[in-house]
Amino acid sequence: MRTPDTRPGRARRRVGVLAATASVACLSAAAPAAFGVVPAPDPHPAVVELGVADAAALLDSGATTSVALVERYLERISMYDDAYDDQPGLSSVITLNENALAEAAALDAERAAGTVRGPLHGVPIVVKDNYDTGDMPTSNGSVALADFQAPDDATQVERLRAAGAIVIAKTNLHEFAAGITSISSLGGQTRNPYDQTRNPGGSSGGTGASVAASFATAGLGSDTCGSIRIPAAQNNLVGLRPTMGLLSRDGIAPMSDTQDVGGPIAKTVEDVAIFLDATVGYDPKDPVTARAEGLVPESYRDVLDDGALEGRTIGLLVNPQYLGVTPAEEPTSALVVAATADLEEQGATVVEVEMPQEYVDAIAQSGVIGDEFKRDLNTYLAQDGAEWPEGLAALTAPADELTLSDVVASGDVTPSVLTSITRYDAAPEMPTPEYLERLDKQDRAREILVETFEEAGLDALAYPTIRQVAQPVGESQPGSNCASSAQTGFPSLTVPAGFTDAGLPVGLELMGLPFSEPELLAMAYDYEQATGHRTAPASTPEIAAPEPTEPEPTEPEPTEPAPTEPEPEPTTPEPVEPAPTEPPAVDPPAVAPVDVPAGGAGGGLAQTGAAVGVLGGVAALLLAVGIAIPVLRRRFGQAG
């Protein structure tokens, strides 16, 4: 495995930016505007736990700039992604966007000119390095594809940028998304910021670790079987696997067309909703998005409701395949059971649901990644306008076409992943009878789920996202509950459920019927606001603000005195007798009487000045509080 300093193609640009300021200064920066004084934006904003909505509030208030945010995030990546102090570093970033500061400056200029595109305007995000970006390579985490350059942005990236988001970096992943511990030949082993001896989940572990460690406000992941939800759960984040067809998959390096989706990983449910508002919609490049037409609300953000659980019915899956009973699984199961009590406290009814064995078997036997990987990755690699290193495609026939066989032949892949993709490359031509049978079992699993929802009157099913906490680096990661959503195409959302006694995060997953994202988001928001389990990792704290420096006094330069003319000799004037004059007669002016208040003439002015001072102080305080409350509510999980 290559170390962080020897990863080929790793575009690491060190940024020496001076650091942080207090959050309160940002929140109250606009108060002097009550008196017509506009303060300069804070060049060193505090960014730990800053989400999309929080960043938008600071930018809208003028408390900071997009350039300042980008500088702060780049500094955090420089500080914490490689080894530091007694920590190995997160190794979560593969490529930094060298144009990020210029993009931020342009978006600041737009804002200053009166154009604000929306809540993502000038907000830094990260993107998993299997999403195409026209200005950066898309490596899929592999040395073999370190210089693979797509011709344009993936549709979701394009839409986020159009909404004003700044892609600050592309993140590491389990190579080719073929695992859930996030190790790759190009990016190395990504680590969990809550315990850097452990994995961050995967395959979108780089996005999960980056967002949790506040290297950006939020990010994009992909999910073929758990790759958004597992890293979200293991990094104390919110992650959505959307309904198949809600979001475009164009430009995402595939594993399985039947199971692949892309979606957001964020610190809050609100931030997930903001991402959805920017990325949903029909895309002719991905015809499956036609399924969502007429099923998308005007805004997912508008459906969020801290009373949404009232009257809802949630089914807790109690099969041991989903709610674990082994000693290694019990800490997670205990937190999920405790979460159901919180759901009930918010007004929901929780019922136990045991899925029939037919469903359990159908899910266990219907995965199609191994069948579709070769076909779908070869289609992606053959996209028009893509570029790759000379000689790579010639490793196997045809010599002018890049294929999975070429990647396997290069050997430039993490050994465990090389074993998997070699097996995928040897898969028989499709469709085989076994493949068609697996698709039939997916259909049957969908039918059973719909029947279960209808018969029990369910609004959602609940279960642990993964039954075991993040394992130590180098060990396998058991316990995934990824398949129910992945192999039916139904949506599922994971939200923080708390920490085990060992201090490791656990995720509660809610699964709904197709296109029930508004209901899932609303219920998760209610739960999130009531419980407030989101907590920043201790291993990546806020970087201290720079101390103000006094300019050193300088001694004035000695100067020669200017030459002067000699003074003239004094002369005595001749005495002169003044002529006598009569003063003119003048009548004294009439003066109106003046009533002077007690305390003297200055007393009234002093009282008026004091009143103005009090009113001004109150106005400034109210303005500062008006800015602070919405951000603090988001920060600390209060209903608003």
Image (cartoon, grey):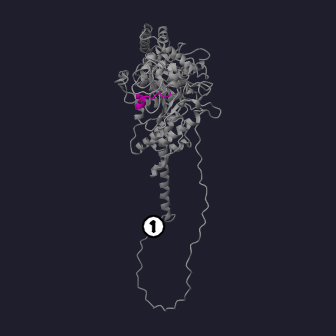
Q: Position of residue 380 (x, y in %)?
A: 42, 22
- Determine whether 237 is above or below 16 in the image: above
Task: Name the residue that disc number 1 marks.
Answer: 595
Q: Quadrant of residue 19?
A: top right
Secondary structure at numbered mark 1? loop
Q: Amino acid at mark 1?
A: Asp
Q: Quadrant of residue 281?
A: top left
- Which residue sits at x=60%, y=64%? 557
- Report crowding for label 1: few under 14, some 14 to 19, many 20 or more residues within 10 A (C-alpha): few
Q: How many marks?
A: 1
Q: Is residue 548 visible?
A: yes
From the image, give the main secondary structure of the stretch colored magenta: loop
Q: Nearer the viewer, residue 301 or 574?
A: 574
Q: Position of residue 512 (x, y in %)?
A: 44, 20
**Magenta residues?**
146-158
- Determine whether 207 is above or below 18 in the image: above
Classify residue 332 as left or right of residue 134. right
Q: Position of residue 128 (x, y in %)?
A: 49, 28
Q: Position of residue 279 (x, y in %)?
A: 40, 29
